[in-house]
Amino acid sequence: MGTGPDFARFDRRHYPTLRAREGYEAWAPSYEETVEDVMDLALLERIRSVSWERVRRAADLGCGSGRTAAWLRTRGDFAVDGVDLTPAMLERARARGIHDRLVEGDVRDSVLPGAAYDLVVCVLVDEHLPELDGLYLEARRLLGAAGAFVVVGIHPFFVMSAGMPTHFDVAGTGPVAIETFVHLPSEHVAAATAAGFALREMHEALVDDEFLRRKPGWQPYRDWPFSAAWVWAPA
C-alpha cells in the first residue's frame, strides 16, 4: 500500500527531529506532564462497540508509560500485555505495575503470541510509522476469530493544516520533534481491509472548550479535529 503525503511539505515548525525510539527515550521523563487525556483517552471513552467486560486478554501496542493500560484497567479485570520500542518508556510502564507482560519490540512485529487476544489497542503510535500495512497485519495476527482492534492517532487534518509534528521540550535546548508521518483515512481503510478487518466505529475529537482549558495556547485551532479513533473487527 502507498504512504501519505510527505509531512515536510506541511512542516511549519522545522524543529530538530529524532526518530521514534530516540525521541521517546528523551521525552520519557516529562511525557506524562505533556500528553493530556483529551487527546486520546477521551476518545476511548466514546467507544460503544467494544464489550470491555468480555475482554479476557488485551495487547497494548506502543504501550509507552502505561497510560492506555491504566485506562483499560478501569474497564475490566483482564490481562494486558504491552509492547514498546523504547526502554525508558518500558521502565515507566514496569514501575506502574499494570501490564502482565512487557516486551521491547516493534508494534509491527511484536513477538506476542498469535490469535491470543480479543482486544488489541494502539494509541498515539501510527503517526510515527512510515506505512500502516505492518501495524494492521500484526493486529490481525494477534486477534482471534473475534475481537476488536482500536487505533487512536493524531488526525491527519491537524498534522497537515497546523504543520505541527509530535514534539516536546528539552530543558536548555527547546522544542524537539519526533519523526511524523501523514496517514489519510483512505490509507487506514486500505491497510485494514487488506489485513482482513471491517470498520465498526470511528470518532474524531475536536479542539473544544475542555481541550483549550488544558492547552489555552491552542486557541487558534479551536474546532479543528485533533485526533481520531478507529475500531476494527475481523471481517
Image: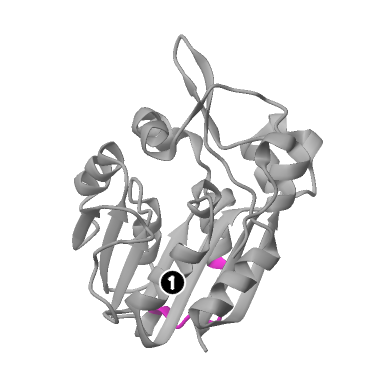
Q: Where residue 173 sits: x, y (%)?
A: 48, 12
Q: Nearer the viewer, residue 112 or 170?
A: 112
Q: Dot 1: what SS?
A: helix
Query: Where 210 falls versus 88 (above or below)?
Result: below
Q: Main secondary structure of the magenta part?
A: loop
Q: Where residue 161 sits: x, y (%)?
A: 78, 42
Q: Nearer the viewer, residue 92 or 14?
A: 14
Asked if residue 134 lies left or right of residue 69, the reply is right
Asked if residue 170 lies left or right of residue 183, the reply is left
Residue 80 visible? The answer is yes
Residue drawn at x 66%, y 40% as measured from the top left = 7
Q: Nearer the viewer, residue 85 or 59?
A: 85
Q: Where residue 117 sits: x, y (%)?
A: 31, 78
Which image quadrant is residue 101 in?
Answer: bottom left
- Determine crowd level at label 1: few under 14, some 14-19, many 20+ residues with C-alpha closer than 10 A: some
- The residue at the far front in this view is 2
Q: Which residue is mark 1?
A: 137
Q: Which residues are magenta?
A: 45-52
Residue drawn at x 69%, y 44% as measured from the top left = 159
Q: Nearer the viewer, residue 233 or 58?
A: 233
Query: Where 62 falls versus 219 (above or below)?
Result: below
- The residue at the far top in this view is 172
Which image quadrant is residue 1 in?
Answer: bottom right
The scheme the figure's colours follow is: one colour
Asked if residue 98 lies left or right of residue 43, the reply is left
Query: Is 140 within the magenta?
Result: no
